[in-house]
Image: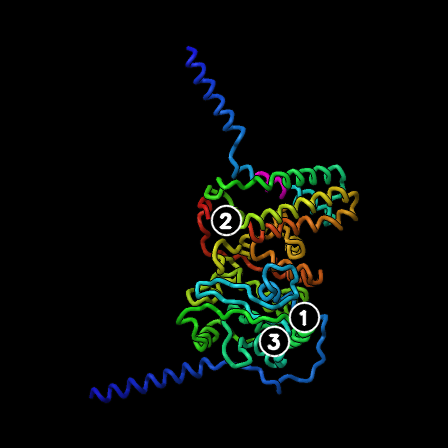
Amino acid sequence: MLKRLFLLAVLAAIAGLGIFWWLTIPAVVAASSLPAYKPNLANGLTAFNAGGCSSCHSVPNQPDRLKLGGGLPIPSPFGTFNVPNISPDPNDGIGRWSEADFVTAMLKGTSPSGSHYFPAFPYASYEHAKVEDVRDLFAYLKTLAPVAGKTRDHDVPFPFNIRRNVGVWKFLFTDGKPFVPDASKSAQWNRGAYLVNSLGHCAECHSPRNFLGGIIDAQRFAGGPNPEGEGWVPNITQKRMSEWSAKDFSYFLESGQTPDGDTAGGLMTRVIRNTSQLSPEDRTAMAEYLKSLPPVEGPPRPKKAEKS
Amino acid sequence: MKRVLVVAGALLLSVGAGVAQQDPVKDAQNVMKANGKNLGGVLSPMFKGEKPYDQAAVDAALTQLNDTAKKLPTMFPASVKDAKWEGDYAPSPKIWEDKAGFDAKVASFTKVVAEAKAKIKDLDSLKANFPGIGKECGACHETYRLKKG
């Protein structure tokens, strides 16, 4: 009887492992699935600015936002992520990557060696990007200067350092679906919705996260504690932003200035350095979409009187 | 009687000193709020074409920003480090940890404001020089200001 129970337990464990293994297989985009394509460098630059690549990947403490040698440490509740080199350097960057490697990284969050990236790389948003935009972005990145130097490994403790587990995270918090326009809305609104939710990855910081680090869908864009430590990321739904006009949003994305003369600080400063490079049309589109976000109550803010 | 007078005088003096010194936290907040008013209420609307260009208002705003530049180097004494900051923002400890970096940002802001003051004479020169001021605000707030709420 006991032996039989033991056997049953072993079988269940094997089945469980099998399911885990199957569930967490890193997805890839096959080169053969990408049709012949002539990349558009100008659109690649737009994707680069909309995607905010340089906010994290440019070498810290120097002014050139096109020097993508990485090295910025990103603290999080799960450990410290060290941003990798994505310059076209053949040894330390992505110089030897195939286009399919890059598309796989952006849309599936899987590395060329076939392991899961940590979601500090915001593929939960990037996965909604158009393949063409990603291919244009790859072509654009290839035109930038190679930067030598491998960056440090991530400093992420057990159990979060087991990459295979990220497959479960992906199962829970990504849907792998491309952006679908809303036919009832204008082309401009849809362009904005696309930029904000895919490349722009605004929700990655402007939403609260659960204990597994997944975005709490019901409170998307409703702000929350800064995932990188001190401070608070504001609610950008109409709950807090009702006094801003669509024009105020686009001017903020251009200049970093709020209607009351305040300026963006903290991490948003880096974001503005990118959005300020977008076309006025794209900023207007993002503004129209952001202005349309229904009011959502965010998590309670810390008491104001306290010294942070 | 003499002694009473001396004590009363000393008390009055200390009260006076207290008033003159005021609260450095409030001071800093008032200066920043005044900057915001000049950017959001005067310079931005002209830059965006929502208000007509007004040289006197521009000069007044830039003079105030210039005053801010003069105050900034001493605006965050170590005594406010652990003070209570009401409102959305507090100074980041980096102001004191990385004093050289902070001073460099202040110097850069001072320079840009002085240049703007010398150059802005009409709408075109406002359009050319105003964004630079905003960038200076953002560049310092990026590292040296904390958002609490």
Q: Which residue sits at x=49%, y=57%?
A: A226
Type of the residue with mark 3 = Ile
The residue under label 2 is B93
Secondary structure beneath dot 1 equals loop
Out of A290 and A279, give the one closest to the viewer. A279
- Residue at far top of view: B1
Type of the residue with mark 1 = Ala
Q: Please, what is the dominant secondary structure of the magenta stretch?
A: helix
**If you read the primary sequence from the N terminus, does the residue marked by circle 3 or circle 1 appear first?**
3
Out of A269 and B38, give the one closest to the viewer. A269
Q: Please state the extent of the stretch shown in magenta in the rendering.
A: B29-36
Q: Does the magenta stretch include residue B33?
A: yes
Q: Is residue A170 visible?
A: yes
Q: Calculate the distance from the C-alpha at mark 3 to the C-alpha at mark 1.
A: 12 Å
Mark number displayed over residue A94: 3
Q: Which residue sits at x=79%, y=48%?
A: B124
Image quadrant in which you'd find residue A83: bottom right
**Label 3 with label 1: CB-CB less than 8 Å:** no
Image quadrant in which you'd find residue A252: bottom right
